[in-house]
Image (cartoon, rainbow, N blue to C red):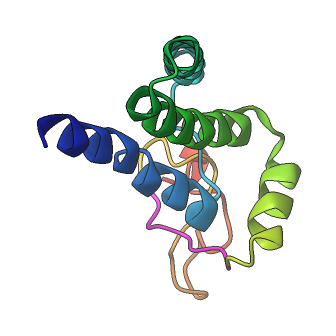
Amino acid sequence: MLGIAAAVCSTASFAPQAWRVIRTRDTEAISKRMYLITVIGFALWTAYGATLRQWPLIVPNAICLGLSAFILAMKILPRRQVEQVAETLGVEPEREAAGPGDGGRLSPCPPSSPRAGRPAGDRAWR
C-alpha cells in the first residue's frame, strides 16, 4: 500500500503543472534544466523497471516520463507552437493576473488605463 500511495502521489504531482501550462501557455517560471534532468531520470527508472519486468516501476515512471516530457517540450517550443498545442487540445487560454516575471502576458488593466494592452513586464509603464 505504501508503494502504491507513493506511485500515485509521484505520478499525480506533474498533472497540475502540465494543466497550468496548457491553460496559461506560460512556461517562464519553469526550469528547463530541472525538467531535462527529471525526464532523463524517469526514462532511466522506466528502463530499469523494464529490465526487471516490474510493472510497479514501469507504469508510474512511464506516466511521469510522459507528463514531464510534455512540460519540457512546452518549455522548449516557441510560443506560437505552445499556443497551437493548447488549441489542438481544445483548451481556451486563461490569462493570470500579471506580476513580476510574468513572461510578457498582457496586463489586466482596464481599457481606459494608460497601461492597457501593454506587456505587463514592460518597466517603462510601471
Which one is in front, 87 or 54?
54
Q: Point out residue 121 in the picture as x, y percentages from the top left corner.
A: 56, 47
Q: Point out residue 119 in the picture as x, y percentages from the top left corner.
A: 65, 57
The residue at the far left in this view is 2
Q: Is residue 106 visible?
A: no
Say whether residue 19 is magenta. Answer: no
Which one is in front, 97 or 64?
64
The residue that appears at 24% across and 43% down in the rendered structure is: 4
Which one is in front, 80 or 117?
80
The residue that appears at 57% across and 11% down in the rendered structure is: 51
In the displayed structure, 83 sits above or below 8; it is below
Residue 68 figure quarter: top right
The residue that appears at 47% across and 60% down in the rendered structure is: 98
- Residue 42 lies left or right of residue 2; in this view the side is right
Q: Is residue 79 visible?
A: yes
The residue that appears at 48% across and 41% down in the rendered structure is: 101
Q: Point out residue 28 in the picture as x, y percentages from the top left corner.
A: 57, 39
Q: Point out residue 64 in the picture as x, y percentages from the top left corner.
A: 49, 37
In the displayed structure, 4 sits above or below 58; it is below
Report the number of discs. Answer: 0
Which one is in front, 112 or 82?
82
Give the magenta range.
92-98
Say whether residue 93 is magenta. Answer: yes
